Image (cartoon, helix red, strand yellow):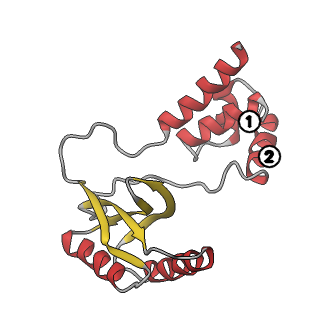
Amino acid sequence: MREIDWKVLSELIKNSKLSDRELAKKIGSSQPTVTRARKRLEKDGYVKEYTTIPDFSKLGYELLALTFVKLGKGLSSEGIAEARKIAQKSLKRSPFATIMLERGQGLGYDEVIISYHENYTSYVKLRRILRQHTFLDLSHIETFMISLDDKIHYRSLTFYAVAEHLLKMKQDEKKE
């Protein structure tokens, strides 16, 4: 990626509603250069979507749940793929907002689900849905819950730090 691409991407991560003219002013470039960089970032897949991060508690959510799931022993690659399809389909119909469902490794678990819930009852419904799937090892499901009503926040959900880190990483690269 070109240096201009890094700068444009960083600013878009911080605030995706900026116009190309505003971006150009912020990074000290011309608007046509920024427009070309933005289109290149979109075409090459660096920008997947433009979105807003709302205040979820103001929208009526009380909990953020990070649910760690262990898949049953002996699942083949095809079995894992089928399990993911089933899980994704049922989560689309769920009474809560699932923002991520991904495979991974760590703490003895194979998948993580990140979801927002209106209340604890909504979270219990997630557990009930998970129990319906026989491919899950139900003895190995753990959840870390965050109260969105808590008055103390160390760092709320934001990508600003990622944007700053990208620029610093690129600057460090240039120094080497």
| Position of the N terminus by quadrant | top right
Q: Position of residue 54 (x, y in %)?
A: 39, 54
In the rendered view, tell whether residue 74 sits above or below residue 105: below
For image coordinates 68% across by 36% down, the residue present is 8
Q: What's under tag 1, amino acid-wise? A: Asp
- Cα separation, mark 1 vs mark 2, equals 8 Å
For image coordinates 54% across by 29% down, the residue present is 164
Farthest residue in the top direction? Answer: 175
Q: Position of residue 4 (x, y in %)?
A: 75, 30
Image quadrant in which you'd find residue 31: top right
Image quadrant in which you'd find residue 36: top right
Q: Is 158 on the left or on the right of 34, as rendered?
A: left
In the rendered view, tell whether residue 70 sits above or below residue 66: below
Which type of secondary structure does the marked residue at label 2 adopt? helix
> Is tag 1's residue or tag 2's residue first in the polypeptide sequence?
1
Q: Is 5 on the left or on the right of 131, as rendered?
A: right
Tag on residue 5?
1
Give the residue number, with chain letter if any, for mark 2: 40
Q: How many marks?
A: 2
Other residues around mark 1 within 10 Å, as few (<14) / some (14–19) / many (≥20): some
In the rendered view, tell whether residue 155 sits above or below residue 124: above
Q: What's under tag 2, amino acid-wise? A: Arg
For image coordinates 65% across by 55% down, the residue present is 48
Q: Position of residue 122 (x, y in %)?
A: 25, 74
Q: Position of residue 97 (x, y in %)?
A: 39, 69
Which type of secondary structure does the marked residue at label 1 adopt? helix
Tag on residue 160?
none
| Position of the C terminus by quadrant | top right
